[in-house]
Image (cartoon, rainbow, N blue to C red):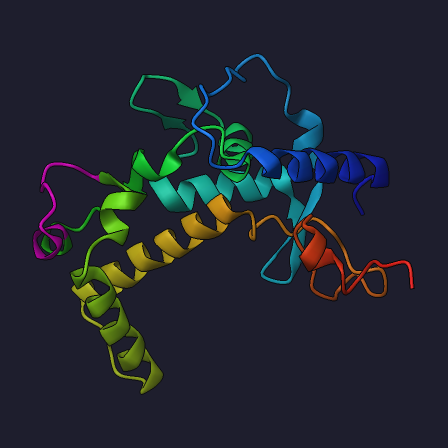
Amino acid sequence: MPNFFSLAFFAVVLLLAGTSRGQQAAAPDTRGLDFKEFGLLAIQDNGRRKPIDTFARQTLIQLTGRSSYTDKAGREWTPNDFLLSAVLETRDWKEEPMVLVSFGELKEQLGLEKTQRRFSFAQLSGSVELPRIANEARERKRVERPLNRLQQEALSVSDRLALFARVMDGSVLLIVPSPKKETDPWVPPEPLAMASYYNES
C-alpha cells in the first residue's frame, strides 16, 4: 500500500496542475530531480498492483520500443520523468515522434515514411486507414478468425495510441485505492473519479 501522505501530496500536485493544463509554457527542466519516491508509489494496472517505476518503464517500452526516449531537441527522458510530464502536460507530447510503427507494409498503407520507425500521436491519430484496419482486426478476433501480419501490427499501433491517450488525459494513473477492498478498482486522483469512494457523508 502506498504511503498515504505521499499519495495525498501527489494528488494535490495533480489537482493544482489541472488549473494550468493546456497552457503553452516552456517545459521545465526536470533532469536534476529525483523520482525515486514517486517511482515507489503503487499503481493498479490491469487489476494488478505494481510500483509506478515498473509501470512507467513498461508504458514507455510499449509506446516507443525503448526504455528511455530522446526528444526532438535531443533531451533524454526517463520513464518516470516522461510519465509525470505527460500527465501534467508540461510539454506537447502529441507532436513528439515516439509511437513505434515498425512494419513496412503498415507504414505504406498509412502513407508514412518507410525509413522512419516512430511517429507522433497527432500524425497517427489523424489517420483514417489505421482505425479501419484495426477495427477489421478486432472483428476477426471476435469471430475467432486468424489475423494477418498487417492486421496484427495495426492492432498493436492502435493499442499504443489508446494507451498514449490515457497517459495524456491522466486516466491511466490509478493510484487511489478503494477504501473497502484492495482488489477493487483504483481510480486516478481526480475529484469526480474519487467521489464514489471518498466523501463526507
Residue at (53% x, 39% y) in the render: 87
Q: Nearer the viewer, residue 65 or 85?
A: 85
Tell me where residue 17 sits by quadrant: top right
| Quarter location, residue 42 | top right
Q: Is residue 11 above or below residue 161?
A: above
Residue 25 seen by the camera: yes
Q: Indicate the position of residue 105 as horizontal and vertical percent values.
A: 10, 55
Residue 48, horizontal then vertical, whole percent: 65, 58
In the rendered image, residue 47, in percent from the top left (x then y), is placed at 64, 62
Q: Residue lying farthest top?
A: 32
Above or below: residue 14 compared with residue 142: above
Indicate yes or no whether the magenta region holds residue 120.
no
Is the residue 71 above or below the residue 198 in the image? Answer: above
Q: Classify residue 6 as left or right of residue 47.
A: right
Q: Which residues are magenta?
A: 107-117
Q: Is residue 113 magenta?
A: yes
Principal secondary structure, stretch drawn in magenta: loop
